[in-house]
Image: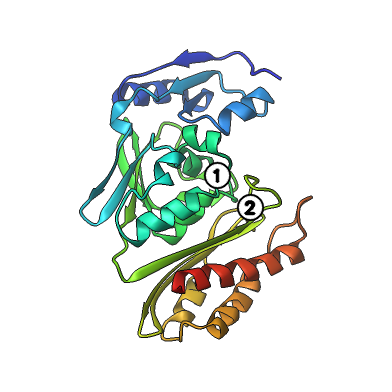
Amino acid sequence: MKPAAFDYHRPLDVPSTLTLLEAHGTDGKILAGGQSLVAAMNFRLARPSVLIDVNRVRELDSLAVEGTFLRIGALTRHAAFHRHVVEGPLGLLLTRVAGHIAHYPIRQRGTFAGSLAHADPASEWCLTATVLDAEIAMRSLRGTRRLPASDFFRGTFTTALDEDELITEIRLPVLDAGWRGGFSEFSRRAGDFALAMALAVLKVEGGVIRGAKLGIGGVADRAIRLSGIEAALIGQQASEATFQAAAAQAREAVEPSADIHASSEYRRDLIAAMVSRALAEAAA
């Protein structure tokens, strides 16, 4: 299949990009990595009449630590995280997660921001943003607004991003040395979308859990933060028994989706397995 006809624009700065977005509304689509959009266009599942290619907007191509945040520009590719982009547990965790995203060629083109904008429930970066309290910055000609990931994702392929808005950067809080991260994902083949995944970040002192962040993805219409289980972990021993108990709670915390790939009950079992593995990795 080939895409339907479209007009193509290649702005060189953010103001020009925003002007195009406002002018074309729902007819315009941002092209960065294009790893989801172009495939959908080829099958004519998406038929934008205007493509706005932002790959030459240099101010969007940034990745740096500023104060207590890692700032991820909108053109930061998945492959940037093959190396530790920040010292400490956050850099290590992001590298771990990046290795599970699709295949190497896709990671060379796909972007962190594009993954969030696409809002696939099985996206590793959407889960990461949700668990790590990411802040998403969006700009339009009306101004700039920032939303926490918890308010940004609305459902499958649905976000709070307005038609005239462009994601310009994502800010992730830098984790201090006391934290450790763990990530576990199950897919039928390497590179496939996950049937279930879990991300855990723990602060353990003297064998006791003093801080916890935990979430699951690939099982509902968006990534889910397990805040109740996080609270229950505080003050517990960082032991296999504790992690198995948390996994059992996670198994019953949601009603997983069912599709041709997995039943709801099968995904429940996967949730428990992924949560226990992620927690164990974070405590190691």
In the rendered image, the residue lying farthest to the left is 67
Residue 138 picture location, percent across and down: 36, 40
Type of amino acid under label 2: Ala
Mark 2 is surrounded, within 10 Å at the Cα level, by few (under 14), some (14 to 19) or many (20 or more) other residues, namely: many
Residue 199's place in the image compared with 162, above or below, is below
Identify the element where label 1 is drawn: strand
Q: List the residue tagged with mark 2.
A: 194
Task: Look at the picture and state if 89 lies above or below 75.
Answer: below
Q: Is residue 149 visible?
A: no
Q: Are marks 2 and 1 in contact (CB under 8 Å)?
A: no
Q: Earlier in the sequence, mark 2 or mark 1?
A: 1
Which of the two residues, 31 or 142, is positioned nearer the viewer here? 31
- Is 166 displayed left or right of 232 in the figure? left
User: Which residue is rendered at x = 35% and y = 69% of the image?
Assistant: 179
Coloring basis for residues: rainbow
Residue at the (40%, 60%) spot, across then down = 132
Where is residue 130 drawn, in percent x and y? 46, 57
**SS of the residue under disc 2:** loop
Disc 2/disc 1 C-alpha distance (Å): 19 Å
Quadrant of the image for the C terminus? bottom left
Residue 96 picture location, percent across and down: 47, 55
- Residue that numbered label 1 is attached to: 158
In this rendering, the answer to whether 264 lies above or below 10 is below
Residue drawn where x is 30% and y is 23% of the image: 13
Circle 1: residue type: Thr
For label 1, count other residues whose C-alpha is less than 10 Å away and answer few (under 14), some (14-19) or many (20+): some
**Residue at 62% over, 29% down:** 39
